[in-house]
């Protein structure tokens, strides 16, 4: 738990810095701070979320379901922070920056005071060892599409990577469900993937979950199944932000759903990007699961 505790302490310091900039910083300071928050979310905070989700929340739900409400609340807040810079409030970057600082502070205190004492009290030595030994499942970064430093070699790598994705998405087979394991959560990359593959982009969080408001965490996985069936009946789709719902389900539910997804007969191809819950994806379905590891450490 030491690493998580230390990361919480650093996160509270970061939140305080961001809150001060939101309150008193210049417009340039605010813009720079938004960039810092984006980098923090994609790097440090994403690793931290994965650590808790993959070693604590799922285990706590399985072993002590009486704490389901706490686990769901924490998972929901993880989702809010992951998506808040994509779906901003519309009140401007200063307000969004202040909101992020507030969410991060309150979330961290909830875990410090409500989650960690429970884990230290109830987890077995074996479970605590899993927490201690966690390593986020990250793969080499996808080459940046920014032209300012791109070389011919970078361009060739990107072209090769996209060709592999397109071939995988269109590969014939008895099952039309496919999963792409991405190195990190990257909405812009997913949007580009839809264009490259010719699949219709279906943002489950935006198009379905947002209709439930604060009750979105109560949505059953059958709603996700029906949504995918309905949309794939019209055309092949790339389903984005499915993990916004999976984050409030137990590890067992996620694993079972991902297996069922690969086993299902979808009307048209369904491509599913997964970045957060890669350990829950079946490892024996190489024809339907693609790991996007780049050659040459790119």
Image (cartoon, grey):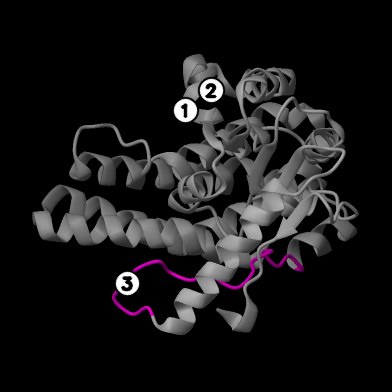
The stretch of residues the image draws in magenta is: 133-150
Mark 3 crowd level (few <14, some 14–19, many ≥20, 10 Å Cα): few
Question: Between residues 55 and 261, which one lies in front from this camera angle?
Answer: 261
- Res. 41 in view: yes
Residue denoted by label 3 = 147
Foreground label between 3 and 2 = 3
- Res. 183 in view: no
Residue denoted by label 2 = 209
Foreground label between 1 and 3 = 3
Q: Secondary structure at mark 1?
A: helix
Q: Is residue 226 above or below residue 58?
A: above
Q: Secondary structure at mark 2?
A: helix
Q: Residue at x 79, y 48 (%)?
A: 280
Question: In the drawing, what numbered circle is on residue 11?
Answer: none
Q: Secondary structure at mark 3?
A: loop
Q: Quarter of the image holding residue 254?
A: top right
Residue denoted by label 1 = 206
Question: Between residues 112 and 127, which one lies in front from this camera angle?
Answer: 127
Secondary structure of the magenta portion, mostly? loop
Indicate the position of residue 6 as horizontal and vertical percent values: 54, 66
Q: Residue at x 65, y 38 (%)?
A: 247
Mark 1–mark 3 distance (CA, rounded to whole Å): 30 Å
Mark 1 crowd level (few <14, some 14–19, many ≥20, 10 Å Cα): some
Q: Are marks 1 and 2 in contact (CB under 8 Å)?
A: yes
Indicate the position of residue 190 as horizontal and vertical percent values: 51, 48
Q: Are marks 3 and 2 in contact (CB under 8 Å)?
A: no
Indicate the position of residue 220 as horizontal and vertical percent values: 71, 19
Q: Sequence-wise, which precedes: disc 3 or disc 2?
A: 3
Mark 3–mark 2 distance (CA, rounded to whole Å): 35 Å
User: On the rendered image, what quadrant is the C terminus found in?
Assistant: bottom right
Q: Is residue 220 magenta?
A: no
């Amino acid at each position: 738990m030491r690493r998580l505790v230390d990361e919480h302490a650093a996160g509270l310091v970061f939140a305080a810095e961001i809150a001060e900039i939101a309150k008193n910083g210049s417009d340039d300071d605010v813009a720079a701070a938004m960039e810092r928050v984006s980098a923090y979310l994609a790097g440090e905070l994403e690793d931290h979320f994965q650590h808790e989700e993959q070693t604590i929340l799922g285990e706590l739900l399985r072993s002590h379901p009486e704490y389901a409400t706490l686990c769901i609340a924490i998972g929901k807040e993880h989702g809010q922070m992951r998506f808040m810079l994509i779906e901003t409030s519309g009140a401007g970057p200063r307000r969004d920056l202040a909101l992020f600082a507030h969410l991060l502070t309150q979330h961290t205190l909830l875990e410090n005071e409500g989650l960690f004492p429970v884990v230290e009290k109830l987890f077995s030595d074996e479970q605590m060892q899993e927490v201690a030994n966690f390593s986020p499942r990250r793969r080499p970064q996808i080459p940046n599409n920014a032209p300012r430093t791109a070389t011919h070699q970078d361009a060739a790598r990107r072209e090769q990577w996209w060709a592999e994705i397109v071939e995988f998405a269109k590969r014939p087979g008895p099952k039309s469900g496919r999963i792409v394991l991405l190195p990190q959560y990257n909405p812009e990359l997913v949007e580009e993937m839809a264009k490259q593959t010719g699949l219709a982009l279906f943002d489950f969080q935006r198009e379905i979950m947002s209709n439930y408001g604060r009750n979105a965490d109560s949505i059953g996985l059958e709603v996700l199944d029906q949504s995918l069936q309905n949309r794939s009946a019209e055309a092949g789709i790339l389903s984005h932000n499915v993990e916004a719902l999976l984050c409030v389900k137990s590890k067992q539910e996620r694993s079972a759903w991902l297996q069922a997804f690969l086993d299902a007969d979808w009307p048209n191809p369904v491509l599913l990007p997964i970045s957060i819950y890669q350990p829950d994806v079946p490892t024996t379905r190489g024809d339907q699961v693609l790991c996007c590891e780049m050659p040459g450490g790119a």
